[in-house]
Image: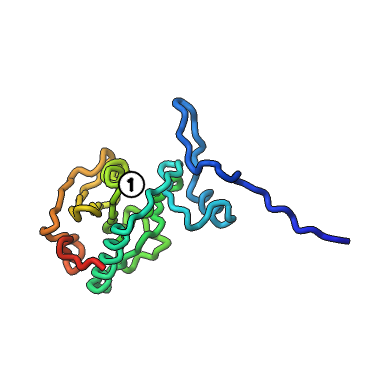
Amino acid sequence: MNHQAPTQRMLRPAGLPMTTQAAEGMDRRRWTVAEIEAMVEAGIIDEDERFELIDGEVVPMSPKGIRHEVIKVSLMNFWMKRLPDNLRIMQETTFRLNTSGFLEPDFVFFAAETKLADLKPSNALLAVEVADTSLRYDTGRKAMIYATHGVVELWTINAETLQTHIFAKPSAEGYLERRLIETTEILAPNFAPEIAVKMGELPLL
């Protein structure tokens, strides 16, 4: 008897757009982090597909330009050489906000005693975003999301100008403190003055 391998079911027709625009007044299905993780594990969603889950909605991330990558790698090299033993830094980790939301910041700093599985907004020390085409979103809606979930400090670095937007004192209405740091000024978190950097003097690889 011949046994034929089961035909793989096509879940997404070729040419189908990856995004939708919601019709006014129509509900959309709310996804959970667990559901998204299960779909990635099952191969329904490619594990390299770049998106964030915002209040249950899947939001595609903008493609990264070469300057974004140069700045990110340069910062990682700079910080790793200076990071004290009591701190850890993660790059592009899935940062779970709650059961229906996660972000993927370029960097997250946290205490060494915090296990990665336990990392959450309340124990993150600093989130850093490098923004090129997404600057308006990163300093607007995304900053609001970080604030409402209690991330104590957020840096958003403009990839074009190297200026940095610093957000602090989170609240339900957003960050209460916001400053623009020029490239000649020192960027230094209170918890680790050792990793201070001037973006204008950062050796870009």
The residue that disc 1 covers is 149
Coordinates of residue 73 in the picture (x, y in percent): 30, 65
| Callout 1 amino acid | His
**Which quarter of the figure is the N terminus placed in?**
bottom right
**Left or right: 63 in relation to 80:** right
Residue visible at 30% across and 57% down in the picture: 68
Residue visible at 31% across and 47% down in the picture: 134
Coordinates of residue 161 in the picture (x, y in percent): 19, 53
Residue visible at 49% across and 46% down in the picture: 32
Residue visible at 25% across and 52% down in the picture: 156
**Which quarter of the figure is the C terminus placed in?**
bottom left
Residue located farthest toward the left when viewing the structure as drawn: 184
Is residue 62 or residue 185 the one in the foreground?
Answer: 62
Q: Is residue 202 above or below residue 35?
A: below
Is residue 161 or residue 101 the one in the foreground?
Answer: 161
Q: Residues within 10 Å of mark 1 (few under 14, many from 20)?
A: some
Residue located farthest toward the top when viewing the structure as drawn: 25
Coordinates of residue 21 in the picture (x, y in percent): 45, 34
Q: Is residue 118 visible?
A: yes
**Left or right: 175 in relation to 11:** left
- Looking at the rendered structure, the number of numbered marks drawn on it comes to 1
| Secondary element type, mark 1 | loop
Coordinates of residue 190 in the picture (x, y in percent): 17, 60
Q: How is the image coloured?
A: rainbow
Q: Is residue 153 visible?
A: no
